[in-house]
Image: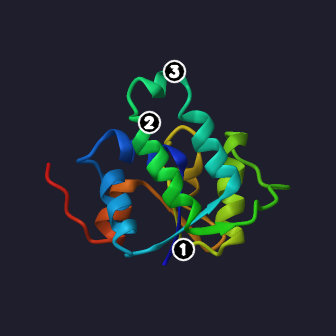
Amino acid sequence: MRVVLDSNVLFSALISPHSPPHALLEAWREGRFELAVSQHQIDEIRRASRYPKLQRILQGHRVGALLNHLQRVCLVDDPRERGIETDDPDDAFLLALASACNADVLVTGDRRAGLLQRGHYGRTRIVTPAIFCRDILRITLGA
């Protein structure tokens, strides 16, 4: 199964160790699914991790380790975003990435951007981290 994780999910995984985003990051590290990323996304994570708001809550060494791991996964050439309409133009690359790599699932925690409301993009299902953990990975998290 090939998966695209929104950058907000990756940041949430680093911030909250007992959360669905962290559980799915661990599932990826255990080889339960293949992660697809693009250089654009890696650059976005690197750039966003330097925002003062995130620097206060992220540990730099954990961001660095994540970036190192991401460089070794299914790195997809930066896909073209032409013709992809999204409520948040910064999210068009996620849909382009999902399409370019034939992703089964796109996981996002951003309810305001409109990706979750789509439900699908082509063959790619769009879900929250909690739904991905519960319905796809069958991970039960404590309440």
Q: Is residue 95 visible?
A: yes
Counting residues from the N terminus, which is met first, the one under dot 3 or under dot 1?
Answer: 3
Few, some or many residues within 10 Å of mark 2 (<14, 14–19, 20+): some
Residue 137 position, x and y percent, is: 32, 71
Count how many numbered circles sit on residues in the image.
Answer: 3
Q: Nearer the viewer, mark 1 or mark 2?
A: 2
Q: Residue at x 55, y 26 (%)?
A: 51
- Which mark is first along the chain, 3 or 2? 3
Residue occupying image coordinates x 58% and y 34%: 48
Q: Is 37 above or below relative to 92?
A: below
Direction from residue 88 to residue 18 in the image, left or right: left
Q: Which residue is mark 1?
A: 104
Cα separation, mark 2 vs mark 3, equals 12 Å
Q: Which residue is mark 3?
A: 52
How many angstroms separate mark 1 from mark 2 (CA)? 31 Å
Q: In the image, 96: left or right of 18?
A: right
- Disc 2: which residue: 60
Q: Do labels 2 and 3 touch, CB within 8 Å?
A: no
Judged left or right of residue 138, residue 54 is right
Is label 1 in a helix, a strand or a loop? loop
Sort mark 1 into few (<14), some (14-19) or many (20+) by Cα contacts within 10 Å: some
Check disc 3 and give the amino acid type: Pro
Give the image location of residue 39, x and y in percent.
69, 55
Disc number at residue 15? none
In terms of secondary structure, where does tag 3 sit?
helix
32 horizontally vs 80: left or right: left
**Residue 123 image-quadrant placement:** bottom right
Q: Is residue 8 above or below residue 132?
A: above
What amino acid does circle 2 point to? Answer: Gly
Q: Position of residue 18 (x, y in %)?
A: 23, 48
